[in-house]
Image (tube, rainbow, N blue to C red):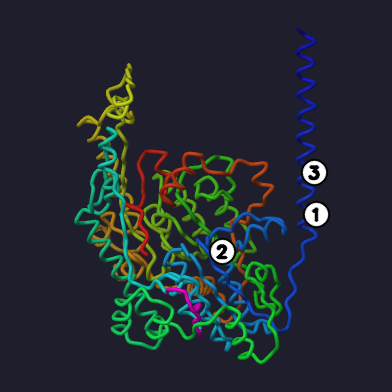
Amino acid sequence: MLLSKEMGKYLLGVATGIVLFLIGIVVLFFALLRFGQKPPSVGSNAVLVLRLRGDIPEKPPIELPPLLASAAGPQVTIADVWMSLRKAASDSRIKAVVVEPEGLSAGWGKIEEIRADLVQFRKSGKPVYAYLRQPGSHEYYVACGADRIYLGPSEPLMLKGLRAEVMYFKNTLDKVGVTVEVEHAGKYKDFGDMFTRSDMSPETREVMSSVVGDIYGNLVDRIAAARHKTPDDVRAIIDQGPFTAPGALKAGLVDELRFEDQMWGELQGALHSGVPQKLALADYVRVPDPAGSAGNKHVALVVAEGDITRGDPDDDGSENSLTSYGFDKVLNRVANDSSIKGVIVRIDSPGGEVTASDEIWRQMNLLQQKKPLVISMSDVAASGGYYMAMTGAPIIAYPSTETGSIGVVFGKPVLRGLYNKLGIDKDAVQQGAHADIDSDYTPLSPAEDQILRQGIDESYVDFVSKVAAARHRPYAQIEPVAQGRVWLGSQAQRRGLVDQLGGLDAAVAALKEKAGIPASENVAIDVYPTPRSLLDLLVKRSQPSMLESRLKQVFGSMPYRAWLQGGYLREMPYWFEVR
């Protein structure tokens, strides 16, 4: 028996040694790849090509070795687009930009940033051409930042207005014997309606009508400005959509019907400088700024993206979710870095757990005491995502940023009916009158409902109070615009919840003013957290649970991570997409 134990230890040691040896080889392999990777060369006649697909994240993606990166396709962020176009504007080697948006699933805030960046680039005097394939409203909105819009000769233009749909599960849950009990503070915080109703409440319909109406108005205004038409003309044109390619040309929505090679031929003719070098955005990101226009002063761009949860104590901030453990470490690191002269926190979050939101809010306020701080809001900064910004720092949002949703919610499913259908019974013993308050087998008693109601109301008052203090307004002025209602950035600005409309350029300008940096002086932008490498995934658990992955496959990018944790939530009341 003793020999057996010693043999087991020996074999375990051998196995451990082999694993460590293999990990060492992997580390060395990727280190050599990184060491040998050189920035791509840029010719004197280059055209920067922005092929934009799917969702364009805020947080840096996984950093892949060159061979795997080319196979996986472009991996760029909103900050990459913004910084590359700024760099290209002063790079004499870049003669033009071609943007090719296709199948974009980014929200209206992100595509507004890209459109505005293209418009800003055009001020350099260099042309921007857009080439569209099966474009919808998102792709066409981006193309409105270009000088000329090209469409394939047989490509339809799916410009037909906007629509928002909200999914409801009550009838399905009734069939399987499941009920969901929900308590919330704020009449618009109708989080549980998707489980307890089969259609929109009057409050939801009011908000959805307002959101779609304002986004549509902004879309019409941008098209009108780009195509030199009146808003009324654009509305009349859209009511005739969708369009065939000839129909889009006749309506004045595009400039030419061409195949892509023909578009490149016309661009070459316009440049009068020979055959252009096509330079992908993902490659140009790695090219040093030849003009040295980055500046000597460093500014941190800290990305807060995803569903807010506590996470794991070992989180270092590089996770693909927004955890208080990890994000607080990033904020603390930035706060204590003497080389950083100011911080922009870029928020793209629908909220999440109350406690996690509180912890991030605390660290954000500590950061505000050490560094000049500006908040830049992306597609969504609502509920807990808005709460974390309550530092008193200037808040900048896009006109279509989903923001506000100042409210608190609690919900739990009661699965007893489902268990009965499956022939499952539960029996229990308990000590404590409310030990079953979170049980999925028993509904809430009146006393338990009152306890939860009290907790939610206290959390709601705390939320509104923090907003009032940060926005320098009385509680009585903030509470009526709270109530869990989702506002767009333009609506929130008019109600004092946002200071300014704009994107990253506006955030940098505001931060320079706070930090005492001259407006004309360039600054270096350092993005946090830094990209995760493939090696990180090999040695560290960083993927969401299998259940969450399956849910996302079925229902899309809804904030399941916080929902699955339970407890009080500062969460968006519903998840919708305006298309």
Q: What residue type is labelled 3?
A: Ile
539 vs 264: above or below: above
Work out whether mark 3 precedes mark 2 in sequence or the reverse, and give the earlier one.
3
Residue at image position (64%, 67%) is 282
Whether residue 518 is in magenta: the answer is no
Q: Where is residue 237 in the image (x, y as percent from the top left)?
A: 32, 81
Residue 160 shown left or right of residue 509 in the figure:
left
**Quarter where residue 331 is shown:** bottom right
Residue 511 visible within the image: no
* Residue 77's disc number: 2
Report the magenta residues as a range: 147-156
- Dot 1 falls on a residue whose secondary structure is helix
- Quadrant (top left/top right/bottom left/bottom right) for the N terminus: top right
* Residue 32's disc number: 1
Residue 112 visible within the image: yes
Question: Which residue is farthest top?
Answer: 1
Q: Which amino acid does label 1 sit on?
A: Leu
**Quarter where residue 579 is shown:** bottom left
Q: What residue type is labelled 2?
A: Thr
Residue ID for mark 3 = 25
Query: Of 331 and 578, which appears nearest the observer?
Result: 578
